[in-house]
Amino acid sequence: MSGIKWLGKYQILGIIGRGSMGIVYKGMDPRIKKLVAIKTMNPKNIADSLMEKRFYREGSILGQLNHKNIVDVYNVGEDKGISYIAMEYLEGTTLDEYIKTQPKLSLKAILKIVKQICKGVQMAHSKEIIHRDIKPANIFILDNDHVKVLDFGVAHFKNSKLTTSGMVIGTINYISPEQITGLKVDHRADIFSIGVILYELIAGKNPFIGKNISQTMINIINRDPEPLSNVPEPLSVLIDKMLTKDRDKRVSSCEKAAEELEAIYRTEALLDTIAEETTLDDEVLNAKQSYIRKLVAEKMEQINKALESETLSDARHILAQLSALVPQHGLIKKLQEKIRQREKEIREREVFYRQLAHGMLKKANELMTQRCYVKAIEVCEKVLTNAPQDQDAKIIKATCVKQLEIFLKKRISN
């Protein structure tokens, strides 16, 4: 198979790598002079229907995921009995190789990498696709330090039944406790795996690695990672939330994790600037940096809670406090935009519910006119569920209740 010159419309230029699944070729679409990576399936695996399904499913999944932090797929096909997926050709290296060739990464570099992983995986989760094998070998660092998530070969849809019962899917050092114990896997398994990568990049070692596979699995299920030293407290808290065994207490989404990583990154960038410009001695500087980290983390949590509860005036007030204390913080503008976006969402929802309520109240009026008071009340209650302050709904409901009372009194008196 390695001697082939063409696969479909693609000219084969060389071999990128070999694996158990098959060979990955470097190719080109000669019509548009575009380089591609062509992943092929070893003909020996075609007899394995599960392997074949997973191969084609990877192409199908990647075709649905258009995101800057996920590798693009261009084509899926078969030629000369060889199944292949043509995808984006990437220049750079996988994260596991990148770590070996780089000096110890700075905290800001680590935060940038993991934030991009979170954003790519969140895109998959938004389509109800769970990767299930997040690990450094499946993270690609381009020459410009941009990150791409690779290899959705064992990914599955939220409600998929393709996984064989009892199989452990994923790479042991990075899988979640629930993947080992056999619980139904959801998006939180990927969050755990990203947490392992984040810990490993900072500490220089995997938090759960044992003497053998069995010990590693036991560690993942039962042992908490050693606390990280010299790490900002907000980051330590985030890592703990990503690596908690109880997935109900884990960070709720990759989107949330990315937001927290962005906040920590921006804070560290600000502290670097302060350190460069300050004349304070180390002890005072460290105390000031610690205060700013704690302040930003607290205000961020307060703002997010205010946005969740839709008390936007509180969110603006807290942001104003943060802006007054650290006006140069790189997150201020993003938070302002986040509040504006939330305002827009609330306005659009209110417009939708007003339009919906208008039609429903018209129906309630008709029912009231027909003396169908109970049905009219039910319609009004539906309106009030979405718009508790709707005066028209309250008036119609109150009128119907009063008319029902009059009707019932007459029935009783008779």
Image: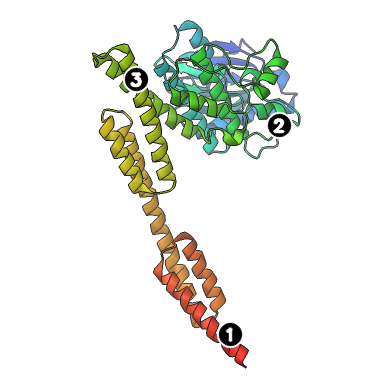
318 vs 175, nearest the viewer:
318
Three-letter code, disc 2: Thr
Crowding near pointer 2: few (<14 within 10 Å), some, many (20+)? some
Q: Which mark is residue 408?
A: 1
Task: Please tell me in which quadrant of the rendered image residue 296 appears.
Answer: top left
In the rendered image, residue 266, in percent from the top left (x then y), is placed at: 35, 25
- Above or below for 95 versus 156: above
- Above or below for 362 versus 226: below
Task: Please tell me in which quadrant of the rendered image residue 320 appears.
Answer: top left
Distance (Cα) linking label 3 and label 1: 73 Å
Discs 1/2, front: 1
At horizontal 23% and vertical 13% (from top left) the residue drawn is 279
Question: Considering the image in quadrants, where does the N terminus appear?
Answer: top right
Distance (Cα) linking label 1 and label 2: 60 Å
Crowding near pointer 1: few (<14 within 10 Å), some, many (20+)? few
Question: Considering the image in quadrants, where does the C terminus appear?
Answer: bottom right
- Above or below for 61 versus 112: below
Q: In this view, does 163 lie to the left or right of 73?
A: right
Q: In this view, does 20 lie to the left or right of 322?
A: right
For mark 3, what is the residue? 287
